[in-house]
Amino acid sequence: MVNEISIQDDFVFGSVMSNKRLCQHLIQLILPELKIEQIEFPTVQKTVQETQFSHGIRFDVYTKDQNGVVYEIDMQIRHTRGLPQRVRYYQGRLDGEMLKDGKKYATLRQSYVIFFICPFDPFSLGRHRYDFANYCQQDKSLALNDGRTAIFLNTKSTQNDVPKDLRNFLDYVDNKDVENDEYVDELKDYIQNLSKNTEWRNDYMDNRTHMMFHDEDVREEGKQLGIAIGEKRGIATGKMEAIQGTIDLLREAGLPEERLKTKVQQRFDLTNPQMQELFK
């Protein structure tokens, strides 16, 4: 199972970045121009929702440095639509977190949305990183200086456009072999030690199962796979094929068969005869 665990997984990434030293090292790696002496203990999977009617968000990793500068880091696996709009929304929510009642706008600190570490090129220009800040369209030398920066990191680039240590990290995220890099070796060892912990491993599999049940892209993949299975096996089309597709995906993910059966029956409220049909 150790070889199957990738830092691309949200749960794994959050577990690693909950280590204050490893998280600070990564931020400094991405922003070497800053002098980060210390950070708060990172908050993993931080949920922010202003009201019951507003769209809630969940930051993968959220922390501040000694000057109150805010850093939010996300691992984005799928190239979904609306990434720039998500940056806009995330930055607004970060501002709302920082600006409490009665405070002046000028008190807003610098914020960095490292959004995202992507195993794809979000803008198709072949770069390892894309940094965005606000500038005057008529005069690009005039910066708005509103304190907001958004950074996209692309693991697929082959350009020589970032320092070697950052490129090594991005190659590691992309599941490439990286040698003679102290930070990457630390990450590998940390994940390997996590994988030996039975409680963490169970939490990892539960999270992976939960994501497969709730992720729209995975549900669609399961549905399509289920239709193909239904055509091959003669199972009636509809709900059962979609469930069968999801079962096959969870098997590929390594979920033990007994836990898989329990999760599927609970999630889809299936009868015993339906379970026998699916697991015959």
Image: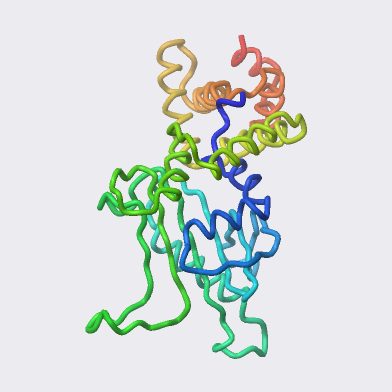
Say which quarter of the image contains residue 207: top right
Question: Where residue 9 sits in the image (x, y, percent)?
Answer: 55, 40
Say which quarter of the image contains residue 38: bottom right
Q: Is residue 29 above or below residue 104?
A: above
Residue drawn where x is 44% and y is 70% of the image: 149
In this rendering, would 197 be left or right of 152? right
Q: 219 or 71: nearer the eye?
A: 71
Say which quarter of the image contains residue 13: top right
Residue drawn where x is 61% and y is 9% of the image: 280
In the rendered image, the residue lying farthest to the right is 199
Query: Looking at the image, how many numbered discs can be counted on the residues?
Result: 0
Residue drawn where x is 62% and y is 42% of the image: 11
Quarter of the image that includes the N terminus: top right
In this rendering, would 155 be left or right of 91? left
In this rendering, would 176 be left or right of 16? left
Question: Where residue 210 sits in the image (x, y, percent)?
Answer: 63, 38
Question: Where residue 86 sits in the image (x, y, percent)?
Answer: 45, 61
In the rendered image, the residue lying farthest to the front is 180
Q: 6 or 276: nearer the eye?
A: 6
Q: Is residue 145 above or below residue 258?
A: below
Please say which color scheme the image uses: rainbow
Question: Where residue 244 sits in the image (x, y, percent)?
Answer: 53, 22
Residue drawn where x is 49% and y is 42% of the image: 216
Q: 90 or 197: nearer the eye?
A: 197
